[in-house]
Structure formats: C-alpha cells, structure tokens
Image (tube, helix red, strand yellow):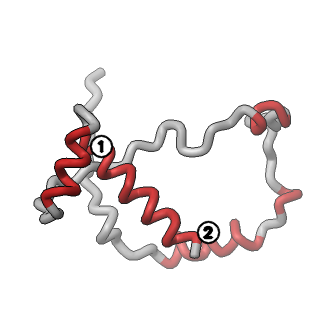
Amino acid sequence: MSKKLVKHDIDLADLPPLTEAQKAELAALAAKPDSDIDFGDSPALPDTFFKNAIQGRFYKPTKTSTTVRIDSDVLAWLRSEGKGYQSRLNAILRHAMLASLKR
C-alpha cells in the first residue's frame, strides 16, 4: 500500500471564497448555544492552569529585513549597550507600538 503526500500552498492574504455550504455550516455553528457543545474529549482545565499561564509564550513574530535611517547618536547609544542593538531597537519600537494601540 503506497501513500501519497499531498501538499497545498495557501496564501493567507488571498484565501478562496467560502462555498455556500461552508457559510451555512458556520452560521449553524454560530447559532448553536454553548450548552449544546460536547466537551467530553477536552476536559475543563483547573483554575490553577490559568493562574500560571503565560500569554503569547510560544508566539514568535516573523522578522522582515529593511533599511531604516536613524540619527547617528541614537544608533551609537543603541550600540554602546553591547551586542543585540537591533533586538533592543525592536523592543523599544514594540513598546511604543503597544502603548499607541492601548490609546
């Protein structure tokens, strides 16, 4: 018995449209009350699980290479802290981005 591996490349930015059957199935699931959901194969987690949970623990954003023009003194300051100046720059920008998104 031979098995064939089938691969599909999917462009998440350009997904194919849903069929009418898929739309109907999604609508039926959305209308279903939570009390009708069978959680038998996935038992409830204890509260201690959520107390120790870390949000985004395994999240690793993709990196994009780019050219950025920044002031020489800013770059010198980042480099003066030692190795990893690009990671520090990214952390500073992420902090500013998250603060902006909270507003």
Q: Which mark is residue 25?
A: 2
Percent x, y for residue 10? 29, 57
Q: Say which residue appears at 26% left-offset and 36% top-offset.
A: 84
Instruction: Please indicate whether residue 7 sits to the left or right of residue 16 in the image.
Output: left
Nearest-to-viewer mark from 2 and 1: 1
Callout 1 secondary element: helix
Q: Nearer the viewer, residue 23 or 76?
A: 76
Could you tell me residue 102's position as x and y percent? 58, 70
Amino acid type at mark 2: Glu
| Residue 83, image x, y percentages | 23, 32
**Residue shown at 31% from the left, 68% from the top:** 13
Question: Disc 2 versus disc 1: distance between alpha carbons?
Answer: 44 Å
Task: Residue under label 1, please give it.
Answer: 87
Vertically, is 65 above or below 33? above
99 or 60: nearer the viewer: 99
Name of the residue lying farthest toward the top: 1
Mark seen at residue 65:
none
